[in-house]
Image (cartoon, rainbow, N blue to C red):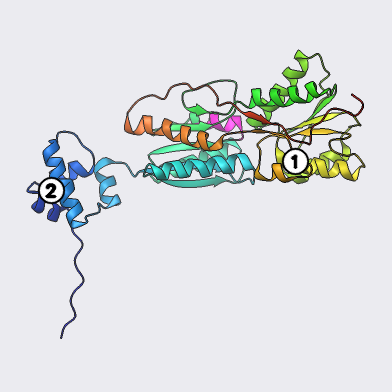
Amino acid sequence: MAKDKPARAANIFDVARLAGVSHQTVSRVINGMPNVRPATKERVEQAMKQLRYSPSPAARALVTRRTRTIGLVNPAVADFGPTSIAMHFTIAARASRYSVDAAQTADAAPATVRGTVEGLLRQRVDAVVLILTDAAALEAVQALDLTVPLVAVAASARRSPHVVSIDQYRGARAAVRHLAELGHERVLHLAGPAQASDATERERGWRDELAERRLEAVEPLRGDWSARSGYEVGERLDVAAGDAVFVANDQMAIGLMSALRHRGLEVPRDVSLVGFDDIPEAAYLYPPLPTVREDVAALGTMMLQKVLVALEEGGEPTVDTPMPAQLIERESAARPTGR
């Protein structure tokens, strides 16, 4: 006895026959095109459901010239901020039925980022999202003759309808203000890379808060965002009992904390520390690290909303105020001994 043949998957012509319409009408319904009566649209959708018909993404792309794919460019670094932003953007995009084609850049050089974007465009992505650590890279990409929407995450004092950001500047000022109000008259800064826009905004906030309080701004030393670089800076940092250090990110603060202990300085008895980013480990250090928290989940959602305004509404994104950052007070910052 012959085995039953597997059931054939329904196609667009089967849907058209069941709904009593042409296959062109089914195609218009599938691709959300206008000029389809509500009753006809309902019949087609019911037929698709009854036949368990699933449109081919490739065929749909040919009709709409859209792939429902967003290109995401982010740096190949193990830094908490960019990695978390990329993750939350991807989650938000998938919830809106978009896939994400992520491409990591080997470095943040403008030519590298520009080449990565051009590669994504050749794959016919519907939009490009950049998570940048280098301000010059954004300018290089914006100079391209793009035919798809572009949205970037970049810390900058200049606002743009195509840029979303967290207020690094005011977050840094809040961190320095906290240390100054505890009684520290010397607040040093361990800065991030000079070319990184996040580092620039955090350093600018540190300088302006000290200037407003008429406190000296000692020229900062720089790390590369890693705990190792924080440790290496801590070995040579000119710091003494009663000082405080505002560190541009939590990983470097962890390294700095370890170096200070090896030098015989105790945190926070001798030196207070405040970091930035609020990585998950910050609350579980000994002592716990005060830091500036960024709402990366909300930032990821905001990025997607800007993309959707351009893709699905055909509009121009608005210029948004940078999202606020929140100071989280913990035990690694305390009043100087004797004050």
Q: Secondary structure at mark 2?
A: helix
Q: Nearer the viewer, residue 229 or 300?
A: 300
Magenta region, main secondary structure: helix
Q: Residue at x 42, y 32 (%)?
A: 305
Which quadrant would residue 250 be assigned to in this image?
A: top right
Q: Which residue is mark 2?
A: 23
Relative horizontal placement of residue 4, taking residue 262 as reference (left or right): left
Q: Residues within 10 Å of mark 1 (few under 14, many from 20)?
A: some
Which residue in the rendered view is the most extreme toward the bottom?
1
Q: Is residue 136 magenta?
A: yes
* Quarter occupied by residue 69: top left
Question: Which amino acid is tagged 2?
Answer: His
Magenta residues? 133-141
Q: How many numbered tags mark residues here?
A: 2
Q: Amino acid at mark 1?
A: Pro
Q: To which quarter of the image does residue 311 belong?
A: top left
**Residue shown at 18% from the left, 77% from the top:** 4
Q: Residue at x 38, y 44 (%)?
A: 98
Q: Position of residue 111 (x, y in %)?
A: 56, 38
Which label is found at residue 288? 1
Q: Who's the residue at 82% across and 39% down the image? A: 233
CA gap, disc 2 to disc 1? 64 Å
Is residue 225 in sight in this rendering?
Answer: no
